[in-house]
Image (cartoon, grey):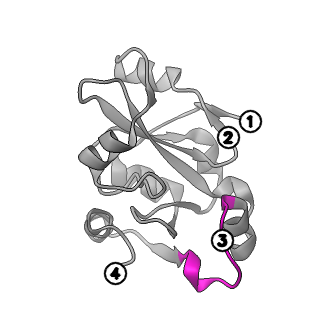
Amino acid sequence: MSAVHPSVFTHLQQAQVQFILHKHADYPGPIKTPRDFAEAIGYSIERISKSLFVSAGQDRHAISVCSINKKSNFSPLADKLGWGRLEVGSAAELSRVTDYPSHGVSPLGVTLPIFIDSHLMSFETILVGAGQIGVEIEISPRDLAAATSAVVLEFAHA
């Protein structure tokens, strides 16, 4: 499964969860935006997630997962971690800590705290990054939470 990052592939094998791999290149027409992807697979945009690599500095990092069309409020995450202020980590930090590209962040395959916005739990499946650009993993949000030991809480808004 060379389409996904090796760490993501290993994590999926170990977790033994069901998933579907979606490669943007397999769909007709260009997929340049999350909305293009949602339309190509016939899903609402809310099921497409964004995984943000967040940092409190000094090697304190986490990943937040919410719907692509929502904005993240990092305060509840920072409170839960006891880290103070969180912000989106730099591309250099992301590469050093996870080896993921900035447009291919995945909550799978890392040993960081993972947070999933509670809104995503209302869907049968969601789509998350595969650690590679242009590749998504469709997975049950419950399986994702279990496989990553994620904390589920409300932190995103329209």
How many residues crowd around disc 1 within 10 Å: few (fewer than 14), some, or many (20 or more)? few
Amino acid identity at mark 2: Lys
Q: Earlier in the sequence, mark 2 or mark 1?
A: 2
According to the image, label 4 marks what residue?
1
Q: What's the CA distance linking mark 2 and mark 3?
A: 20 Å
Amino acid identity at mark 1: Ala
Q: Quadrant of residue 32?
A: bottom right
Across and down, in percent, residue 87 comes to 46, 27
Tally of numbered tags: 4
According to the image, label 2 marks what residue?
70
Residue 31 disc label: 3
- 30 falls in the magenta region: yes
Image vertical order of residue 67 relative to residue 37, above or below:
above
> Which corner quadrant holds the N terminus?
bottom left
Across and down, in percent, residue 40 comes to 71, 75
Amino acid identity at mark 4: Met
Residue 158 disc label: 1
Q: Residue at x 33, y 38 (%)?
A: 113
How many residues crowd around disc 3 within 10 Å: few (fewer than 14), some, or many (20 or more)? some
Image: magenta residue range: 23-34
Across and down, in percent, residue 97 comes to 26, 44
Q: Are marks 2 and 1 in contact (CB under 8 Å)?
A: yes
SS at circle 3: loop
